[in-house]
Amino acid sequence: MSLNKLCVYMGIALLSLMVPTGYAAADFVFDLNTGSPQSPPFFPDFAKVDVHLQDSTNATITFTSLKNDLNNMTYLLGSGSQGPAAVAVNVNAKLWTVSSITGSNSGLAFSPGQFTKGGSGTMGVFGTFNQTINDQLGFIHAATSLSFTLTNLSGTWTDASNVLAQNERGGFAAGQIFVSSIPADYTSSLAGDGFASNLRINVPVPEPATLLLFGSGLLVLACLRRRFNKN
């Protein structure tokens, strides 16, 4: 086989791996960085939301609480004075199911509650979200991580950023946030609770492996073009 043909085959093989297969590999990640006005003046960001598309109809949503070391604050997700919903999302689908709801707490003396799927619910000033996840009432049942799986029964999602849609207030997701000191400890003082949602949204970043494949394909084609120009 000639070198020219080998370059052609290598280029086609590498670039074919770049063709979309129904969904994108990059996660859609953003922060809940805006607290509700009625909440005490806590410091964002409060929690991170990661939307991971498993395939064109299944996506895992993971909420992870954040800390503010400068102000010695740690934030937890749970059900408190604002209602039963610990977290909420606005699903971009007409019909879906929720499964595999799990929660955990890396702090001390906590007992993360029985998490259950709710229906549509209002998260304070951040408006209505069409899917809520409820927790047992109380600070002791709060979580530092909460995840669940969405299954689209009415269509498909082309990429992770397509799984959620903005609600009437511009929110993709919201959470009920407990505020405590660092480290998180149920026996320590609870500073308060309130809702938080997103404001600034980060653009999904391509995975390094995807960039490597794309760069390799271009390199092969550049090599081929150079050889043809010499001929």
Image: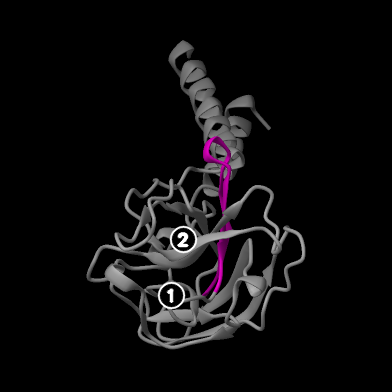
Left or right: 76 as drawn, with respect to 169 = right
Residue 91: tell me if it is visible: yes
Q: Residues within 10 Å of mark 2 (few under 14, many from 20)?
A: many
Mark 1 = which residue?
Answer: 156
**Secondary structure mostly taken by the magenta-highlighted segment of the chain:** strand
Q: Position of residue 161 (x, y in %)?
A: 41, 59
Q: Nearer the viewer, residue 136 or 197?
A: 136
Q: Position of residue 25 (x, y in %)?
A: 54, 54
Mark 2 = which residue?
Answer: 160
Q: Residues within 10 Å of mark 1 (few under 14, many from 20)?
A: some
What's under tag 1, amino acid-wise? Answer: Thr
- Dot 1: element: loop
Q: Is residue 204 above or below residue 57?
A: above
Which mark identifies residue 123? none
Closer to the eye: label 1 or 2: 2
Please name the residue shown 58% across and 58% down the image.
64
Please name the residue shown 72% across and 58% down the image.
107
Q: Is residue 110 above or below residue 120?
A: above
Residue 8: tell me if it is visible: no
Left or right: 211 as drawn, with respect to 88 = right
Q: Nearer the viewer, residue 97 or 67?
A: 67
Q: Which residues are magenta?
A: 58-78
Please name the residue shown 37% across and 79% down the image.
93
